[in-house]
Amino acid sequence: MQIGYTTWGMPSVPVDQALSFLSEQGFDAVELTVLPNYTTAADRLDSDERRRIKRIFQQYGLDMPAVAAHRSLLDEDPDAHRENMRVLKQAVDLCAEWSDGRGMPVLDTVLGGAPEDWEPRLDFILERVRELLDYAAAREVVIGMEAHVGSALDTAQKSVQLVETMSSPYLGLNFDISHFDVLGMSIEEAVRLMAPYAVHTHVKDQRGRVPDFEFLVPGEGDFDFVTYLRAMHAAGYTGSITAEVSHMVQRHPGYDPFEAAALCYRTLANAFAEADVSRS
């Protein structure tokens, strides 16, 4: 497994500065966020810049396990859905272009909607997922759908149902255990259900339970990263364990993206060492 970081926590940091800093910290992999409010927004990346970013990753010896582009698939307004799909399809194209010769980054995204949408709107949900999946599959890009508290896809059980129903090699799960932890699910149960379908991961720290919870920077709470890493290793997961700093944290006064990233690295590096899980 690798220690990774997502630039989700660095929306205003130039890509050169972000990758240089993350490499210096010791990260093995970086997920790049390409949403409109980021310095690496897909719309800002012409062909020269896309090639340059790929060269910077190679320069620092960083893997790119995923590209983050969270956009709802369930908006019923035609114009809003068209724009969301445009952003998502751009991200798929970037995944294909940023292949390192061994594989392509996963497209990390979410479903949107609300928990109560799942059962009554399941046919509509599957139709919308299929629309994106068909585009990604044609480019051999894998989608990592992330369960998210408060969205239609919010539990491990729904996540497994989705991938098993779609039954495509191009649809897996971005396993962010924080969303299950705040629901009260144990590490062991979450890993048992999610790891077999995980094509990418996020980890945060967290405190409390839904609805009274908050996400934290890894190392600020008491999540048991050692038990988590041992469980993921035992489950056969070999990809990036990718630290994420949520928007909830970024909204705090005085938020420093560099301090947060440094704490993420220290927390995960110490946990890997204590868990006796090797990095590759």
Image (cartoon, rainbow, N blue to C red):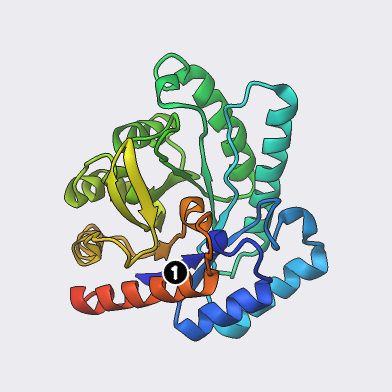
Which quarter of the picture shows residue 160?
top left
Decide if residue 76 is in sight here. Answer: yes
Could one spot residue 176 in this view of the protein? no
Is residue 9 rendered to the left or right of residue 179? Answer: right
Q: Of residues 262 and 69, which is closer to you in this image?
A: 262
Q: Amino acid at mark 1?
A: Gly
Residue 42: quarter of image: bottom right
The location of residue 139, given as percent across then percent down, is: 64, 49
Q: Secondary structure at mark 1?
A: strand
Residue plotted at (60% across, 40% down): 71
Image x and y of residue 35, in percent: 66, 51
- Front residue of 200/44: it is 44
Q: Nearer the viewer, residue 108 or 214?
A: 214
Crowdedness near tag 1: few (<14), some (14–19) or many (≥20) residues, C-alpha within 10 Å: many
Dividing the picture into quadrants, the one containing residue 149 is top left
Residue at left 32%, top 77%?
269
At x 29%, y 44%, the residue is 182
Given the current orientation, which residue lies at the most extreme front position?
Answer: 253
- Above or below: residue 16 compared with residue 167: below
Q: Quadrant of the C terminus?
A: bottom left
Q: Is residue 8 left or right of residue 200?
A: right
Q: How many marks?
A: 1
Residue 162 position in % (x across, y down): 40, 32
Asked whether, in this view, residue 93 is left or right of residue 33, the answer is right
Q: Is residue 198 above or below residue 260?
A: above
Residue at the far top: name it: 120
- The residue carrying mark 1 is 4
In front of the other: 203 or 30: 203
Coordinates of residue 7 in the picture (x, y in percent): 56, 64
